[in-house]
Image (cartoon, grey):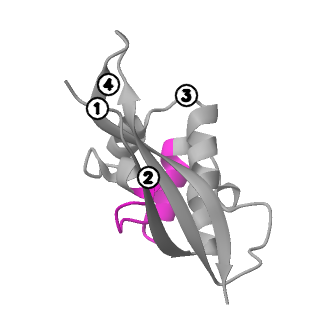
Amino acid sequence: MAEKTEELLYVEISEMDYLLICNVRDLRKEIGLTQLQLSQKMKLADGFVSKVETFVERAKYNVRHLPLLAKALDCEIKDLFPKQTPRYDQVKLTLRRTNRINRDGSVSTKKETEVARIEPIH
């Protein structure tokens, strides 16, 4: 049986990438799409959106993805961008990774990731 573990990871990312990913995630959730469904609607690998949203992988959205995202989310490209202007060029994310808990209460081998802290890189 798996044991619940917690690990901290540190990732450097442009603040604009971070804010874009968060905004797209919020739009995705708002319309009730899973990460898998959004990846499939964009005609990309099934795990692509998951890799982008966990920040653990190097995958990020790029300019090519913008029209694909807008079409999949039924919005304008401008709606994908965050409302606030980034304050910093780069930020350091502290990510907390823990095992998921299964419906039966057992500890899963799958991990979930949450952003525990965001710090500017000067």
Circles 3, 1 touching at the beta carbon (< 8 Å): no
Residue extending furthest toward the left: 1
Above or below for 26 versus 18:
above
Residue 63 colored in magenta in the image = yes
Residue depicted at 59% across the width and 65% down the height: 18
Alpha carbons under labels 3 and 1: distance apart: 31 Å
State the separation of the CA atoms marked 3 and 4.
26 Å
* Magenta range: 52-72
Residue 46 shown left or right of residue 119 in the figure: left
Whichever of callouts 3 and 4 sits on the residue coming sooner in the sequence is: 3
Which callout, 1 or 4, points to the residue nearer the camera?
Answer: 1
Q: Which amino acid does label 3 sit on?
A: Gly
Q: Earlier in the sequence, mark 3 or mark 1?
A: 1
Would you say residue 57 sits in the magenta stretch?
yes
Q: Which of marks 1 and 4 is nearer the N terminus?
A: 1
Labels 2, 3: front one: 2
Q: What residue type is labelled 2?
A: Thr
| Residue under pointer 4 | 107
From the image, tell me which residue sits under label 3. 32
Q: How many labels does the image show?
A: 4
Horizontal relation, residue 45 to residue 61: left or right: left
Per the model, the C-alpha gap separating discs 4 and 2 is: 19 Å
> Is label 3 or label 4 in front?
4
- The numbered dot on residue 3 is 1
**Which amino acid lies under the numbered mark 1 shown in the image of this protein?**
Glu
Q: Residue 54 carries which label?
A: 2
Classify mark 3: helix, strand or loop. loop
Residue 72 position within the rendered picture, expressed as x and y whole percent measured from the top left? 48, 44
Q: Do the residues labelled 2 and 3 touch (CB within 8 Å)?
A: no
